[in-house]
Every structure is written in structure tokens, then in C-alpha cells.
Image (cartoon, rainbow, N blue to C red):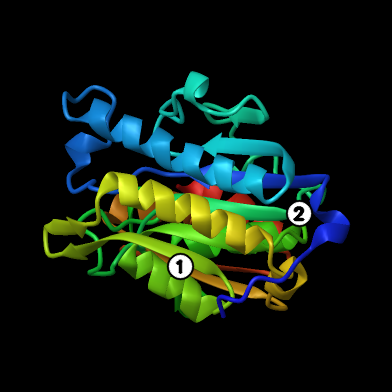
Amino acid sequence: MREIISTKAGVFKMKVYISADIEGVTGVAHWNETLKDKPDYKEFQEQMTAEVLAACNGALKAGAKEIYVKDAHDSARNLIAAKLPEQVKLIREWSLHPFCMMQELDDSFDAAIMIGYHSAAATQTSPMAHTLTDKFSSIKINARPASEFLINTYTAGLVGVPVVFVSGDKGICDEALAFNERIWTVSVQEGVGASTVSIHPHVAAKKIEEGVEAALLKDLSRLKVKLPPGFKVKIEYRDHISAYKASFYPGVIRLANKTIQFEAKDYFEVLRTLMFIS
């Protein structure tokens, strides 16, 4: 699945979207390394920026002329803008649009890329495994455990944009390949209990740059997502109070003390509901 297919006919005006998180950035092993007010944070802010820069450089080498980057971690004020290429438009903070980590994505983009992504809530492949918020113990969409990768890949599918590249921990890369074996992945670390085992930060950046370039030179049409005809979403909260509150949102029913469920035909309605019950 690693053969490169030339796309010269459309490459010169390529427009690329990058969504960047931090828990799947090389070396991150503890929440203190992800929070702006902690002394451990600066080193991993630098590495998050380096990995996004690598993705941008790979996209530019593949022919991208316009790149949007969504800072999609916590405050959404993590990336060091001056270290990114001049072709980048950086989206900081949260607009509170239901697209969330994919804000400003639309059908004008040729491809989407995910950097620093991490394993889903209720999995054992990252010490910081979670989905969207620490309020949720687990999310399932059509009985499938839902990571931020899955939620955001469906968001991209809603506007017809293929997700072509994912970097992060081994758990999320394995999930991406199970979802679509044509997605190019770079696993930068593996979670083992409360620890992570990482490759060298410089090696990670090199692999990301090379991988993004290669992914964008493939036949992107083969990575487009066909959305399911409908969505049944089941969420277990960490506490019963959050589930009780969410049960009053239109269409949401409470199945148990900590568990709610809702259904929708339109995936945008899934995103809208998630925004209001998170």
C-alpha cells in the first residue's frame, strides 16, 4: 500500500488541511507535558510545532499551495506560528462550531492530515487515551469505539475530503489502518501502561515529512470516505450528573445512570449533539 501514484494534473493548486493535537506527539507521556501552565509543557510545545512543520514541509514538497492548520489541543493556543511556513493559515482558539478539531474544513480542500493524534477513550494503548473530553469514559458510533480520528474522519467525509495521513501513537495508527489501509501512518510512540516508548524526535519529524509528501502524491480519490446511512451514538460518562444533564438535549435518551444514546441520519447532527453534551 506504499506505492506512490502521481497526481500531477491537480497537484499545483493543492489545498491541504492539518489538524494537530499533542497527546500523540513524540515523547509525550504525562498530562503535565500537555498543559500550558506546567513547567514540562514547553519542550512538547516545541515538538508539536516541529511535527506540524514537518507535515507542512511534506505538503509543500508534494505541491500544496495553501495549507490550513487547526491547533486542536486544549486551549488551541499551542503552535508557535512564526516557525511554520508562510503558506500556512493558522486557526487558534475554539470558534465553537460543531466541526471542532476540523474547523474551517470544507469541500475546497484536497486532503486532510492528522498530527499528534492519540488512542480513544477506554483503550489501553496510551496513558492519555481519551476522546474529546475527560467527561467521557467511552464513545461508540454504530457500536464502533470512537476516537477523535474516527469522529474527525467522518467530519472530513461529510464535506468529501479524504484523510490521507495520520501520525501519533501506535494505537491510533493501527486504528487508522484498520479503517482504511490506504491511509499513510507514522507511529511515533507506543503506550505501555502509564509509560510511552518513543522514537527520536528528529526521526519522527523526518518520517512525518516524508510520509505526508508520499501520501499526497497518491491517488487521493481512493481515500474518500463513504459515510454510513445513519448513526447510533452511545456515550458513557465518568459521572451520572453529566449523563443526567445530557439527557435533556433533544433526541438524547438515558440508558443507565452514566450512559446516554442518540441517533441521527445526518452526521452534522451527531457533531452538533456532541458539541452541546460534552
Residue 153 in view, yes or no: yes
At 76% across and 49% down in the image, what residue appears?
109
Camera-side residue: 63 or 14?
A: 63
Kind of residue at badge 1? Ala
Q: Quadrant of residue 156?
A: bottom right
Which type of secondary structure does the marked residue at label 1 adopt?
Answer: loop
Looking at the image, residue 113 lies above or below residue 253: above
At x 26% / y 26%, what residue is drawn? 42
Query: Which of the two residues, 12 or 173, is positioned nearer the viewer here?
Result: 12
**Number of numbered callouts drawn:** 2
Asked whether, in this view, residue 143 is left or right of residue 3, the answer is left
Q: Are marks 2 and 1 in contact (CB under 8 Å)?
A: no
Asked which secondary structure carries label 2, the reply is loop
Where does label 1 land, which residue?
146
At label 2, the amino acid type is Asp
Left or right placement of residue 43 versus residue 95 in this view: left
Q: Where is residue 233 in the image (x, y as percent from the top left)?
A: 52, 69
